[in-house]
Each structure stands twice: as structure tokens, then as C-alpha cells.
Amino acid sequence: MKILSQLRSPAVRDSLGIGVAVGAAGLAFGTAAVAAGLSPAQSVFLSLFMFTGASQFALVGVIAGGGNLVAGALGALLLGARNTLYGLRLADVLGWRGVRRALAAHGVIDETTAVTLVQPDRESARTAFVTTYVVLGTFWVASTLVGALATERVSDVGAFGLDAVGPAIFLGLLWPRLRDEGGRTRLTALLGAGIALTTTPFLPPGVPVLLAAAAGLIALFGPEPGHARPAERRPDAAEERNEEVGS
Amino acid sequence: MTLWIALIATAAGCYLLKYAGMAAPRRLLDNPWLRRFAVAVPVALLAALITVEALRGEGQALAWDTARMAGVGAAVLALMLRAPFLVVVVAAAATTAALRALGL
């Protein structure tokens, strides 16, 4: 009976929904990774251990373009740096130490953070975090394997439109922030795209994307945006969550 | 082998970035400059990735591929209609594949 009542709790319901939906996107990652030249084992390795979608896609994107591995790794790490910020905020909310904290750290990504930070108390925050982490992680790894094995049998990646999958995924991740945040976010995106576009013909693949990080510097100018960042401020938690899912 | 090393190193780095946040002193969050830059960087990187991947040509060259761009357009449309993530991705691939099948 305890399980039944837990299944009805909002923390678990939200976590299951997001976990299944986002986890299934591993299908696209497996596809993109094998199309880039990775083996299915390498694709699954990334989903299991790197476990942060945007970084994984960025890395295989550079490999697909025949780019420098160091540039690809740096790009993935730069994108992964936002998880540090999430970790800072989750540490207080979850209140774990030692081994538990070390294990939980692996699960710090956009979606687990978004679901966890909107919970009203520590107990539901922990439930939400663990449920999202386990469900999303399982689906993510399994669907990566399926996508990788299926793509291995496809001879012409272009015929299935798989080259449009990468941009579509990044658009999906970026969209909520473009929609919900102010003009400065759009300006940052525009500048980042411009930097990458103008430097691509002259620099090795991967490097233009790294340079585009400089566009983030314009966030340092002008007034501080009115967002309540710390998780303690609850009233606008719903809005904050909306924004986090896509970042 | 080089590829494996790169994958393992990057995966380890990504984990350490997550762990650093969980274990770091709280007051780091109080630094507004750090916070603002860290929040803005993914926007710049994602926009750059979209551009580079949508316009990828041979080697370093940029190229316009009508079928691929139509797929990206379909993704935008799906996002405007607030479609779920997976629908967005499938719409992009299906549009591009359909146009290629038609000979574009």
C-alpha cells in the first residue's frame, strides 16, 4: 500500500513523466553517436557515465565533424559546467553527505534539478530526485543502446534525416529559455550563433563552439535579471522550473 | 583507443563538475558574476551548436542543405506548438527524410 500512495504523490508522478519522456530521447543520442562513428559500446558508455545530454551530443557532434577531440571534450565540459551550479543548489535541498552525496552527484542534470527544486520539503525533494534519476537514467541508457544498434544497421544516415536530429535536440534544449527569458538571453544566443558561424570556416571543428561561450559575457553587463535563483525562494518555483528544464 | 581515452576523460570531467557543485562551499552561489555567467553560457553554446550542425558541410566548410534546414524548421514549428521533446526530434528527422526521398 505504501507504494500505491507513493505513486500518487506529485513528486513521483512528475518524476516518472519527465523521466520516461526525456529518457526516451536516448534513442536520438544512440543514433547520433553511431552516425558520428562511435561504437554502440562507446555510445552506451557515455550515456551511463557522462550522463548529461547536451555534453554528450556536443562531444559526438565534434567527432562527427572530424574535429579535434580536445576541443570536443572542452566543449562538453563547458556545457557540463552548469551541472556544478545545479549541484550547489541541490546540496542544501537534499542534505546528503559522504557516499550518498558522491552517488547523487552523478544524477545532477537539468531534469533532476528542475523536478527536485520545486518540491515543498526535503523528503519529497529526495523522493523526486531519486525517482527522476533512476527512471530517466534507466530509460536513457536503454534507449541509447536501442538507437545505437538500430543505426548500426542503417547504411545511409542521411536518408533517414538523422543529420537533422542534432540541431533539433539542441533547439529543444534551448527553446524554453528563449521563450521565457528576456531579450538578453536571445541576444546571447544570437551572438553565440554569430561567433560560431563566422569562425567555422577558419578554425578546426569544435573550436568555434568553444569561442561562442564568450557570448555569455554579455550577461555580466546591465542590471541583474529579476530571477530568484536560490531554491529557498518558493513563490516563483513553477516559473523557475519551466526555465530549468530547457537549460 | 584514443577515442576511448577521450570519452573516459570527458565522462570523468563531467562527473567531477557535478560533484564539485554538491561539495563546494555555499558562498560560491553568492557571487553574482559567476552565477550570471554560468547561467548564460549554455545559451551561447547551444545556439552555436545549432548553427554549426545545421549548416555543416564538408570539413570546415559551411553548406546549405534544404532538406536538413526544412527538418530544423519542422523542429521550430513543433516547439512553437509546445510538442514534447521526442516529437520535436522525430518531426525534424521525418521532414528531412521525406524531402530527401522526394529528391531534394
Image (cartoon, grey):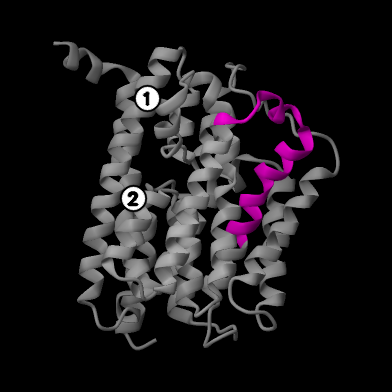
Query: What distance separates the C-alpha of mark 2 from that of mark 1?
Result: 20 Å
Q: Nearer the viewer, residue A121 or A234?
A: A121
- The x and y percentages for residue B59 are 54, 86
Q: Quadrant of the N terminus of chain A?
A: top left
Is B32 included in the stretch rendered in magenta? Answer: yes
Q: Is residue B74 visible?
A: no
Q: Would you say the residues marked 2 and 1 are in contact, meaning their CB atoms lie under 8 Å apart? A: no
The residue wearing badge 2 is: A48
Q: Chain of mark 1?
A: A
- The x and y percentages for residue A205 are 59, 76
Judged from this view, the residue extending furthest toward the left is A1
Question: Could you confirm whether marks 2 and 1 are on the same chain?
Answer: yes
Residue drawn 63% across the image and 52% down it: B43
**Which numbered marker is on residue B57?**
none
Give residue A161's quadrant in the image: bottom left
Q: Which residues are magenta?
A: B23-47
Q: Quadrant of the C terminus of chain A?
A: top right
- The x and y percentages for residue A68 are 56, 75
Q: Chain of mark 2?
A: A
Is A181 included in the stretch rendered in magenta? Answer: no
Q: Main secondary structure of the magenta part?
A: helix
**Which numbered marker is on residue A128?**
1
Tag 1, which secondary structure?
Answer: helix
Give the mark count.
Answer: 2
Residue drawn 85% across the image and 44% down it: A221
Q: Amino acid at mark 1?
A: Ala
> Does B55 appear above or below A27?
below
Q: Amino acid at mark 2?
A: Leu
